[in-house]
Image (cartoon, rainbow, N blue to C red):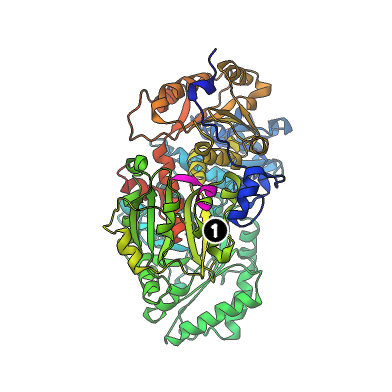
Amino acid sequence: MVSIQQQLEPAPAHISAPVPSTITAHQGIDLVMGRTSLPAVGDLPLLRGPRKGDTRTVVIVFGQGQEKIVAVFAEVLGKSYRVKNGFRDVSSNDRDLVVGISATQAKTDIAGRDRTSIVAINVHCTNMGMPPDAYLSAQCDYEFLYTEAPFFRRDLSRFISHTLGQLNHHEILMAKPRTYIISTTFPDVHAALPNIDILTVGADAIEIRVDLLKEPLGDGTYAPIPSLSFVGEQVMLLRQRTELPIMFTTRCRAENGLFPMDNPDLYYEYLYRAIQWGVEYIDVEIWLPERIRRKLYEQRGSSRIMSAFHDFSGTFKWPSARAEATFRESARFADIIRMIAITNDHNENFELEYFRSKIKAEYPDAPPLSAVNMGERGQFSRALNRMFTPITHPLLPIIAAPGQLSAAEINQALSLLGQLPRKNIYGINTPSSRISTPQAPFYGKCFNELGLPHHFSVVERPLKDFASVEAWCNQKNFGGAYLYPAVPFQHLISNSAFFASINNGTGPILSDSVKLIGMVDTIVVQSKASFSASSAPSSAPSSPGHHQNSDSLGSIASSQSGLSPTTVMVFENAAWKGILSTLTRDFAPSAYSGRAGVVLASNPDDAASSLLALKALMVSKIYTVGFKASPAVARDFNLEPFNSLESMQKARTNGANNANHDASPFVVVSALAPEKSNLVGMLVRVFGSRGSSTSRKVFLDLADGSFPRKGDPKLIAEQCGFAAYGAEDVMAFTTVETLRLLVGQNVPYSFVRLASERPMF
């Protein structure tokens, strides 16, 4: 039997051992080549993203004829399922299952269920009519509304990952240097959907203004207050069409909204239902009674509370005792504090900045503050605010508050103020990868849409020439770069005295991901004054070559005098997050936790990002095909090589025994080149035979689709029952992450696919 290793002709190199600590990159080479000790992989913060979350038994309450939704929930969570006759039949033996109970049977004993061991989710198909059963809505912990045709599985995955606490986008947003939130001021979300991809460019979250919604009645008029039934469908529609976190707002009349103020309990009813719907952010106005604010805060689950204060009187003063008292009261029941006031004088913007710095110094452990002044005179404060700055867009029917600016207008203002200087940013390719980077021209489009002053160029470096990269990085106005394909950081350091000399001679700072896998695909630069480890981006240089914009090395070199000594350079890796996002689009992280995976690659460098993504998803064992890892990496990532088809068959048949279900590979990732498609297809068939398992498996093909190939592994995988994804999905998610690292701005995945002429929907 010819071994799989012989068929793939693997490169002799090994995956570099991770760097054990935040050390200088050139010192790290010795440790990478022959380390002696290393912290556990899970000790690094980057791998604390996906979590086990809520481990209670998930019980799905389904309507008549909707039993099949239970199987979908189970598949998304990576579990088996059973249908039972009532909550009384759910026991500790069902802990690793998803249990389904019909709505009729659930009504009889849901109130008496053990809430410490059961999380109940009322699932309702809107095609069956609205509203859902009011009693079940109130009794269940959460409620999932969905459409049967079309059915958005990614919506279900997002909902369950959030409500069970397996993914937390809030921590990621809080680490960003700036965040923006856009408000949909449409009376009906349907009106926003055609342009939602463009509307949300630059936004980190999207606000649904419930008080501005207009629910049509049969007589041609509108309901004075939109019903929960109507609002629920609106939230469902919005979540189906955007991956952005949603903020749920019921703005009262006194604060420039339309919600009545005569019944505070009405606010609780709507805001708590938003928590049940899995909305990520809940806007709770500070004028509401303490009992309501406290109760919402205690019941928020994985949602986050924004305590909101708006003053339109014109008498509010930031230096006053009232302002500080308002902040302290807001902080009691909040994860974020929003304070907004109308301004009469430009100097009040400076008073706000003093208040902001005072709060930060005197209340270092308080929730983050988002504070701006309204009106034209207050627009300056919107440019200076860094936390969830409210933004608008020209395509919106009205602005949500006086003086709101778009993301592009804020960036343009920051540029004029000298806070956002023009930088040269590069996409660094090799000749062989030139046609395989469809995202390259997209960066220029994004910069224009975001109003960024930066200049973007695509350049080429010779495949084996790493020293030439410094020509692009060693510029005064260098703003960062992406590298495609990724490069081992040791190669950059060992071939360049420049990289070893930056950051005051300590070398580039390595992100956690680069420490672990040694591969750099993004180089980020920041000023030392603004640098923080949690939000630092990364950037990479390249040699002279093809340009998207007509520059030459000589013209750039003549106008630059070298990278500023006040600049911090960070080596980053974005690809692993692109893979992670792809794998969790339709599956919750728990689907991978404790399972086995397979990674196919011709060399260890190609496999590195995939290995890290699987480790972040808590995959317990990773079988490798076509490459050999160093003993240290094999131990830390729990790798086991496949040396023959017999060894593969043995691993596959592990799943034939239900008691050993998790030992059979659940996810297969191929980083093999297109010309090896036939081999990939053969291996997919091997692992596609499910035995007695009913769990749908996952296949990810990282081969560049722009090159000719023999056979389509994705098609074969789908025929074998896999959920199959391709390089275009990973490339889009990686582009989102790369932009976040390079310019600190969010560009939604859906917009990336739209601009690449591959619409998401």
Please tell me which residue lies in front, 501 or 440.
501
Q: Percent from the top left, x then y, of residue 49?
A: 60, 48
Q: Is residue 68 left or right of residue 678?
A: right
Disc 1, SS:
helix
Q: Is residue 126 above or below residue 740?
A: above
Say which residue appears at 60% left-offset and 43% top-offset: 616
Query: Is residue 135 in view from this perspective?
Result: no
Q: Is residue 487 magenta?
A: yes
Rate crowding at label 1 as few (under 14), some (14 to 19) or many (20 or more) other CA atoms within 10 Å.
many
Q: Name the image quarter holding the C terminus.
A: top left
Residue identifier under label 1: 500
In the depicted structure, whether residue 689 falls above or below residue 64: above
User: Who is closer to the viewer here, 540 or 93?
Assistant: 540
Rendered position, 438 above or below 627: below
Magenta stretch containing residue 31, yes or no? no
Q: Position of residue 109 (x, y in %)?
A: 66, 38
Quadrant containing the N terminus in the rendered view: top right
The residue range painted magenta reads 485-493
Up/down of 42 relative to 371, above or below: above
Answer left or right for 651 relative to 713. Answer: right
